[in-house]
Image (cartoon, rainbow, N blue to C red):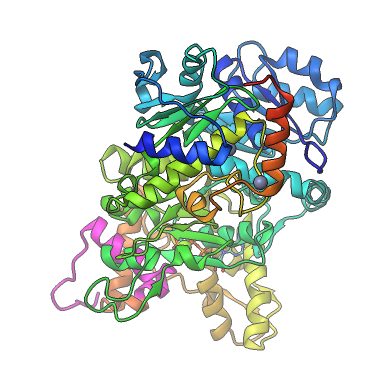
């Protein structure tokens, strides 16, 4: 259900066709036992092997909490200027912080982080503008505070990167 | 393409997954990142470009992080190096700081911490270089803000304090009552770039659990009965300044857990509130308790200890640095001359000998109080033996093989009885604060003896 909704949001933003793939299980090798989290880098590698021939980008959504060895957590990871991205919903829920569930807020966060990570695959780096979805957000407070779309600058850069690369 | 100048970062770590993930994360922030899997490779790559920063793992086979930093500094003395380390090697990391690392991170670290640190480095690079020059100039002095000493260990502490003042690392200051823990905390704040922001001190010992909770976190209006208005907690009031958690060894296990979570996530909620508030302040903590022992006895959480003890400073008691006693006496006389409008010139030899020989369980604070009292009663412009009242039993009155604790216990009992168990007056005489006195009464199981018998 959330994927269906997200599919439309992503399609509307990037003006592209977005397809939902059958669910994949999180690779067991990505589990970091001592931390009870999953390595986003390892998941990303796994995703890369699953990219359909006709797809330009692949976005993975997981409920697992993600991390990289050096950071306590990440909301997601992407290949900068590459193909794959992954977003974790674990820390985007109010429940994670002891709050009451807030579905609209949760969806808004999933949307922002998905666009953000996909933005990275289009070669975008963090944007100084707080209005832009590419603004760095390490906490949900930051996620909620930043804008929900790409700023004009990022939009232009992403479009030129996409156009300059291989066709669809 | 960004319009700003690219920032070049070198990541040195023997683990591929660390290099890969950190690189990808930093690249998303717009930095140019390259990696090396060890010290040798890193040195080879050094001439390749104008590096702004190196992130170096402490433990690597062959050349470790500190050795690498030393080598790098031989050819590029201004290179900013951040050492990455695991809990177990915090001591080494402190050594790294002293050897010139800009900062260090304990793995795994908070994404926000590293983003902010790197941004700051990039923004303030120039400022830091100026500071380093100043620091070298200051090194020669016996002073750190309001603190003085000529003891070797203390001078090392002053040095370390100046170094850590630049970083955002949490510092745990340990030492007996009256050794100058709070003074040192203030000095660190004053030496830091946060000097113009507030220094907020919370005494964790004097409050009940729920009071301390609302003192720290604040509360929303109506959070509990009596919460008539919104109150901002000290965490909030500290803003971008320094929050000093005094007597941290005295907080309840529940609050320890809350505090740990808050320190890890660097955000908190007011009691009864739902909004998360980010912490911008730097945290310093102090205690006069033996936290290692408290951990062994299950009274203090080890994880909180490690969080706080990123940099550890142990201030030695005054009796282990008696060379400071004459220096401090002189310092206090100067200070009180101004405050009291007196013109005391010094101390007689006999008076000085008594003071140098004393054990000073209340350390510098007790010494300060003794000097203050002596100056009040002094007839001429010299403090003599008769003016120095060391509230009876000095070490001479307690000969034999007694532990320091026994002497302290007896001494406290004596002072309490002399003052008819007036806590405020006794604490003043002992040169410790009321809370410390209560704690010691509890610790030694001291009880008021019937009708205080004279003699
Ligand atoms: N090195 C020093 N130089 C000058 N004054 C000092 C020094 N050390 C301590 N003092 C004096 O001792 C007083 C007590 O110091 P401070 O309050 O920092 O002690 P503390 O370690 O925090 O004690 P407690 O554990 O009882 O809270 C200071 O106000 C200052 O007057
Ligand atoms: Mg104190
Ligand atoms: Zn932008
Ligand atoms: Zn990002």
| Image coordinates for residue A49, horizontal then vertical, percent | 50, 11
**Residue B338 shows up from this direction:** yes
Above or below residue B123? Residue B90 is above
Residue sitting nearer the eye, A44 or B341: A44
Above or below residue B340? Residue A23 is above
Q: Does B171 appear in magenta?
A: no
Question: Image check: A132 left or right of B70?
Answer: left
Residue sitting nearer the eye, B11 or B446: B11
| Image coordinates for residue B207, horizontal then vertical, percent | 31, 67
| Number of marks in the rendered image | 0
Residue sitting nearer the eye, B207 or A15: A15
Name the residue: 33% across, 56% down. Answer: B250
Which span is picked out in magenta?
B426-455
Q: Does B442 appear in magenta?
A: yes
**Residue B92 shows up from this direction:** no
- Quarter holding the C terminus of chain B is bottom left
Quarter occupied by residue B69:
top right
Residue sitting nearer the eye, A109 or B4: A109
Quarter occupied by residue A22:
top left
Above or below residue B389? Residue B320 is above
Above or below residue B218? Residue B287 is above
Name the residue: 29% across, 72% down. Answer: B416
Question: Image check: B100 left or right of B174?
Answer: right
| Image coordinates for residue B431, horizontal then vertical, percent | 44, 69
Name the residue: 37% across, 27% down. Answer: A35
Quarter occupied by residue B176:
bottom left
| Image coordinates for residue B206, horizontal then vertical, percent | 33, 67
Question: Image check: A28 left or right of A85?
Answer: left
- Quarter holding the N terminus of chain B is top right
């Amino acid at each position: 259900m959330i994927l269906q909704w997200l599919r439309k949001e992503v399609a509307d933003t990037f003006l592209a066709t977005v397809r939902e793939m059958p669910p994949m299980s999180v690779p067991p090798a990505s589990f970091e036992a001592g931390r009870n989290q999953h390595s986003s880098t390892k998941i990303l590698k796994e995703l890369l092997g699953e990219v359909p021939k006709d797809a330009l980008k692949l976005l993975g959504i997981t409920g697992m909490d993600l991390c990289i060895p050096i950071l306590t957590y990440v909301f997601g990871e992407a290949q900068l200027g590459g193909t794959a991205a992954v977003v974790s919903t674990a820390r985007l829920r109010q429940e994670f912080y002891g709050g009451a569930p807030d579905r609209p807020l949760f969806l808004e966060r999933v949307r922002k982080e998905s666009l953000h990570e996909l933005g990275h695959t289009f070669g975008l780096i963090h944007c100084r503008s707080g209005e832009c979805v590419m603004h760095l957000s390490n906490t949900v407070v930051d996620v909620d505070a930043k804008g929900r779309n790409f700023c004009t600058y990022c939009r232009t850069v992403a479009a030129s990167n996409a156009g300059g690369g291989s066709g669809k | 393409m960004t319009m700003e100048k690219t920032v070049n970062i070198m990541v040195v770590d023997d683990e591929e997954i660390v290099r890969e993930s950190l690189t990808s994360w930093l690249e998303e922030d717009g930095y140019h990142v390259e990696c090396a899997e060890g010290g040798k490779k890193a040195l080879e790559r050094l001439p390749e470009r104008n590096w702004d920063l190196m992130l170096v793992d402490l433990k690597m086979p062959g050349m470790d992080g500190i050795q690498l930093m030393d080598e790098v500094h031989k050819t590029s003395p201004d290179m900013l190096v951040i050492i990455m380390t695991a809990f177990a090697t915090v001591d080494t990391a402190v050594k790294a700081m002293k050897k010139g690392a800009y900062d260090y991170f304990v793995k795994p670290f908070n994404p926000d911490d590293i983003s902010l640190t790197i941004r700051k480095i990039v923004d303030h690079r120039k400022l830091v270089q100026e500071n380093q020059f100043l620091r070298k100039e200051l090194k020669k002095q016996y002073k750190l803000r309001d603190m003085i000493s000529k003891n070797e260990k203390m001078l090392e502490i002053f040095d370390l304090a100046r170094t850590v003042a630049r970083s955002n690392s949490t510092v745990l200051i340990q030492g007996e009552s009256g050794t100058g823990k709070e003074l040192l905390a203030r000095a660190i704040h004053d030496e830091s770039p946060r000097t113009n922001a507030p220094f907020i001190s919370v005494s964790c010992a004097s409050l009940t659990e729920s009071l301390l909770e609302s003192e720290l976190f604040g509360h929303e209006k109506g959070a509990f009965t009596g919460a008539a208005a919104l109150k901002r907690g000290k965490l909030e009031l500290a803003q971008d300044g320094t929050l000093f958690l005094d007597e941290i060894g005295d907080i309840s296990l529940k609050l320890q857990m809350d505090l740990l979570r808050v320190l890890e996530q660097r955000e908190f909620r007011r009691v009864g509130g739902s909004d998360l508030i980010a912490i911008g302040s730097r945290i310093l903590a102090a205690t006069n308790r033996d936290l290692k022992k408290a951990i062994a006895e299950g009274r203090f959480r080890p994880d909180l200890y490690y969080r706080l003890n990123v940099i550890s400073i142990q201030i030695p008691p005054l009796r282990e640095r008696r060379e400071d006693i004459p220096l401090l006496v002189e310092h206090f006389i100067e200070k009180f001359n101004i405050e009291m409008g007196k013109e005391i010139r010094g101390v007689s030899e006999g008076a000085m000998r008594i003071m140098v020989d004393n054990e000073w369980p209340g350390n510098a604070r007790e010494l300060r109080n003794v000097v203050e009292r002596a100056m009040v009663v002094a007839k001429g412009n010299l403090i003599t033996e008769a003016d120095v009242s060391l509230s009876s039993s000095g070490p001479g009155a307690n000969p034999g093989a007694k532990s320091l604790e026994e002497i302290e216990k007896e001494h406290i009992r004596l002072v309490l009885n002399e003052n008819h168990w007036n806590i405020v007056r006794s604490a003043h005489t002992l040169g410790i604060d009321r809370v410390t006195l209560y704690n010691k009464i509890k610790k030694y199981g001291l009880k008021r003896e019937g009708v205080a018998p004279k003699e």
